[in-house]
């Protein structure tokens, strides 16, 4: 089963890699403060300058009191990146329903594989770590959470600019990699609303039902979720 999941992820990744980004010309129209960029899987961040042409595989990150304006030539569209966001340039595009369903399937396979691997490892939650090793582990965890929060802020930018498909997919990806953030009402709602806007009624309804089961919901939050569930069932 494990081998099949990995094989399926590989096949789907290859298929998606074959889909071109459309030759999009993407440039930086304005930079304020500390704005950085990395390309592909590298962890090296470089400073962004006004006039730079961006690689579709790039990720842009803005710091505190920093911002950037990204211009997409083919859509004649400007996207403002506010402070403290992290956005993949490849997410600034519309997906066909076929692309969306393929990517959604791949994300579900990844989530299933992630859950299966965690159960197989069966790592006790009470492991004691002392001294410097504990400090490094805690610092690493905080850094990871910070990266997740930056990405969620970036997803809000995608959503506000009408990139609902990539917003939904990216939310699923981030919450899979940062499980503690998946307990937060506002982040789960962001993903559910993006699915709804992307015209995936069944997926959105399932997500709202899962949100309604979160133990930390306030009465007001629960009412909001139940309202969305009722509305979708009527459609």
Image (cartoon, helix red, strand yellow):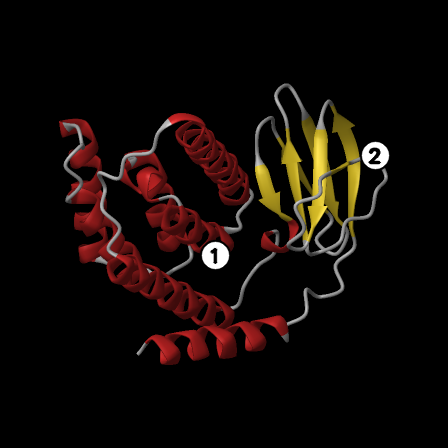
Residue at 77 percent of width and 49 percent of height: 54
Q: Where's residue 103, x and y in %?
A: 47, 67
The C terminus, quarter of image: bottom left
Left or right: 132 in relation to 216: right
Q: Where's residue 209, x and y in %?
A: 18, 51
Residue at 65 percent of width and 50 percent of height: 89
The N terminus, quarter of image: bottom left
**Quick check: 190 above or below 204?**
above
Q: Which residue is mark 1?
A: 165
Give the spatial CA distance, label 2 vs label 1. Answer: 28 Å
Residue at 38 percent of width and 79 percent of height: 3
For label 2, the SS is loop
**Quick check: 12 above or below 26?**
below
Residue at 53 percent of width and 47 percent of height: 162
Q: Nearer the viewer, mark 2 or mark 1?
A: 2
Left or right: 217 in relation to 102: left
Q: Where's residue 161, x and y in %?
A: 56, 43
Q: Which residue is mark 2?
A: 50
């Amino acid at each position: 089963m494990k081998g099949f999941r990995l094989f399926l992820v590989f096949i789907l990744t290859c298929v998606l890699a074959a889909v071109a980004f459309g030759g999009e010309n993407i440039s930086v129209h304005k930079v304020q403060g500390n704005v950085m960029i990395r390309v592909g899987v590298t962890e090296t961040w470089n400073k962004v300058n006004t006039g730079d042409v961006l690689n579709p595989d790039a990720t842009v990150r803005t710091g505190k009191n920093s911002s950037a304006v990204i211009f997409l030539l083919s859509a004649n569209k400007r996207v403002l990146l506010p402070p403290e966001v992290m956005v993949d340039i490849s997410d600034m595009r519309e997906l066909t329903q076929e692309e969306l369903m393929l990517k959604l399937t791949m994300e579900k396979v990844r989530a299933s594989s992630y859950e299966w691997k965690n159960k197989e490892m069966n790592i006790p939650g009470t492991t004691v770590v002392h001294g410097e090793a504990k400090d490094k582990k805690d610092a690493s965890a905080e850094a990871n959470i910070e990266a997740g929060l930056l990405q969620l802020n970036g997803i809000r930018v995608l959503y506000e600019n009408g990139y609902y498909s990539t917003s939904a997919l990216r939310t699923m990806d981030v919450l899979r990699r940062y499980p503690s953030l998946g307990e937060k009402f506002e982040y789960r709602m962001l993903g559910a609303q993006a699915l709804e806007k992307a015209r995936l009624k069944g997926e959105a309804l399932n997500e709202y039902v899962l949100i309604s089961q979160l133990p930390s919901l306030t009465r007001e939050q629960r009412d909001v979720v139940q309202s969305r569930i009722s509305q979708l069932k009527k459609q």
